[in-house]
Amino acid sequence: MNEFELEPGETIGLSVRSHWIVLLSRLFPSILLAFVPFLFPVLISSAARMNPQTGSALLTGLSAASPWLTLLLAFWWLFIWMSIVATLTRYYLTIWIITTTRIVDIRQYGFFSRQVSSFLLSRIQDVTSDVDGFFETMFGFGKLNVETAGREEKFQMSGIQHPVEIRDLIMREIAALHKTEGSSETGI
Amino acid sequence: MILPTASGASAPVTAVQAIPVNPISSPFGTLFATFTPVQVFGIVFFLIFVVWAIYTIVFIYHWFRYNRSSPLTIPFITLHLMVSAFLFLMASSGFLTAL
């Protein structure tokens, strides 16, 4: 990661991505589309049952165009594969990094569309985890809302894995930070 | 349509003229009349390969730029190249004998 440099004494506590089930739900439309070509033989065979003449004509036409059908099928799957690769890239390059002093929120919206936000733990006022729904409860993922002081900004990460543990980690880091600041202020 | 004739008997009248109709020419017909199927395949293959190559360069750039340290980077790029190579080979499989 080159978007941010760690300050002296700053260490990375945790790097977290969305839950794998979120990735699966994003990949599902592409997987479904990959199986669409397998419907055509079923349709042709049902057409052949209803009208044998049409069915045999279709089969003859399709066998004559076989190299072109293979080409079409291969390029159909190639474009689906490219969309899967784009989804995986978005998934892996979207990450939250919790360090000892701040949270770095890196979001990859698409190729050439990337947002990096960094906010200090000392400015955080409220951290809320939200596990709402059947799948969220079963697989242990949910939302994490972080509200910061000052500009009343609210950062949210949806579909995050172990939101309760991450909330606790952030609270622990904030407590440790306040303790360190308190110690340095009193000169201990 | 049945019309009465001069003799009073009814006879069918053909409403359609007996002129041969020219077949509708599709763009694909023109394409294949101008180029051989192998040439059409070559053009289609080349265009899609260019799109794929640009996409792959962008994809590799993103993984190396933002996720270089990940142990997944090289295996994932390799997987992409292997799956793509397989699909390009599959696409050309029907035409390789004609080349």
Image: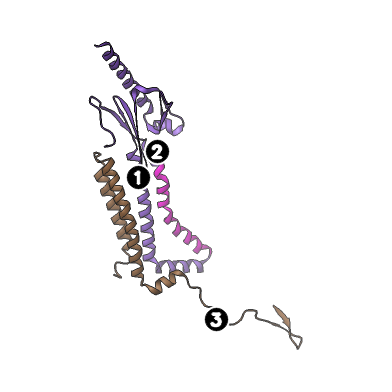
Chain colours: A purple, B brown
Q: Position of residue B86 (x, y in %)?
A: 29, 56
Q: CA distance from mark 2 to mark 1?
A: 22 Å
Mark 1 lies on a secondary structure that is loop
Q: Is residue A68 magenta?
A: no
Q: Do the residues at pointers 3 and 2 share their chain?
A: no
Mark 2 lies on a secondary structure that is helix
Quadrant of residue A112 within the rendered picture: top left
Crowding at label 1, few (<14), some or many (≥20) Cα neighbours within 10 Å?
few
Q: In the drawing, does residue A98 fall left or right of residue B21?
A: left
Name the chief secondary structure element in magenta. Answer: helix
Q: Which residues are magenta?
A: A25-50
From the viewer's side, name the closer residue of B40 and A114.
A114
Which residue in the rendered view is the most extreme toward the right? B8
Q: CA distance from mark 3 to mark 1?
A: 58 Å
Residue at the disc numbered 2? A22
| Of labels 2 and 1, the one closer to you | 1
Labelled disc at residue A72: none
Amino acid residing under circle 2: Val
Labelled disc at residue B20: 3
A16, above or below B77, in the image: above
Q: Chain letter of disc 1? A: A
Q: Residue at x 29, y 29 (%)?
A: A14
Labelled disc at residue A112: 1
Residue A168 in sight in this render: no
- Quarter that holds the N terminus of chain A: top left
Query: Pointer 3 and pointer 1: residues touching (CB < 8 Å)?
Result: no
Quadrant of residue B52 within the rendered picture: bottom left
A163, above or below A54, in the image: above
Residue A110 in sight in this render: yes
